[in-house]
Image: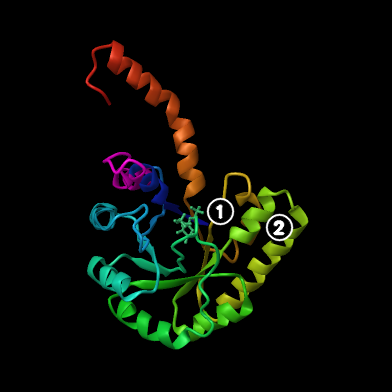
Amino acid sequence: MRLGVNIDHVATLRQARRTFEPSPVFAALIAQQAGADQITLHLREDRRHIQDRDLELIKELVIVPVNLEMAPTHEMREIALRVKPDRVTLVPEKREEITTEGGLDVKGMEDYLRDYIKPLKSEGVEVSLFIDPEEIQVEASHIAGADAIELHTGTYANLWNEHRFSEAKDEIERLRKAGKQAKEFGLRVYAGHGLTYQNVKGILELSDIIEELNIGHSIIANSVIFGLERAVREMIETIRGGRNGI
Ligand SMILES: CC(=O)[C@@H](O)[C@H](O)COP(=O)(O)O
Ligand SMILES: NCC(=O)COP(=O)(O)O
């Protein structure tokens, strides 16, 4: 399976102070250097983390494919048509949510999405729909003309994190079924949301169906922990050792 690294929450930390660090652009380059197959970022309508300039710089500097997650609004399509990421993933958005709560309700939006997607595809941008693992949503994604789907793994992740392993196993079966159905329609199948170093293991049994995982929060959270010791040492050196900082 390929790994797309979502760098949104580097920007969350920066936006907590509206300052210049940590930089999601720098993070994207480090993730690429470490072997990420793709950089994923979500330009939310409320700009709570990633900013337009981050997207522009990442598209300019990163060599691996860039996957832009965005709500299916006209403002966002204008941006995507200007920046031309390698992929657009259409996701639902609610202003008051802490994180994306579910998949896009494609059923009933097929006509809107078909028109929405066309200019993106004409510009060579792959279009993926972030959906719940439901037959009705997979079929609607096919009708809407998507190239791919990204299966929302949030329900699985929450069940696993709460140690409800038997229900988590049932959710794996739902993901398997939806993924298989999507492949029969000729859709490429990706997955992500809420995956961690622990719960990702259960997803690996779907490696014959899912081509790629997008993982963000857990990687960024662990990078703070892995990197903290060095960061403290560097500050001590800077204060006491006459150094000029990192
Ligand atoms: C759609 C999705 O899963 C990602 O956008 C990811 O969750 C990071 O963004 P938020 O944490 O802002 O939802
Ligand atoms: N589309 C899922 C994604 O990009 C990463 O989600 P998360 O790991 O931050 O929950």
Residue 6 x/y as whole percent: 42, 52
- Magenta residue check for 21: yes
Is residue 197 left or right of 2 when viewed as pictured?
Answer: right
For disc 2, the neighbor class at 10 Å (few under 14, some 14 to 19, many from 20) is many
Toward the front, the furthest residue is 96
* Disc 2 secondary structure class: helix
Q: Is mark 2 within 8 Å of ligand 2?
A: no
Name which of mark 1 and mark 2 comes first in the sequence: 2
Residue 168 marker: 2
The residue beneath circle 1 is 194
Regarding residue 184, the answer to whether it shows in the image is no
Q: Is mark 1 within 8 Å of ligand 2?
A: yes
Residue 75 occupies which quadrant of the picture? bottom left
Residue 231 occupies which quadrant of the picture? top left
Q: Do the residues labelled 1 and 2 touch (CB within 8 Å)?
A: no
Residue 213 x/y as whole percent: 51, 57
Q: What stretch is highlighted in magenta?
A: 15-33
- 184 is higher (above) or lower (below) than 41: below
Q: Which residue does the image show at 26% across and 68% down from the upper left?
A: 79
| Amino acid of disc 1 | Gly
Q: Which residue does the image show at 62% across and 75% down from the upper left?
A: 134
Residue 50 x/y as whole percent: 34, 54
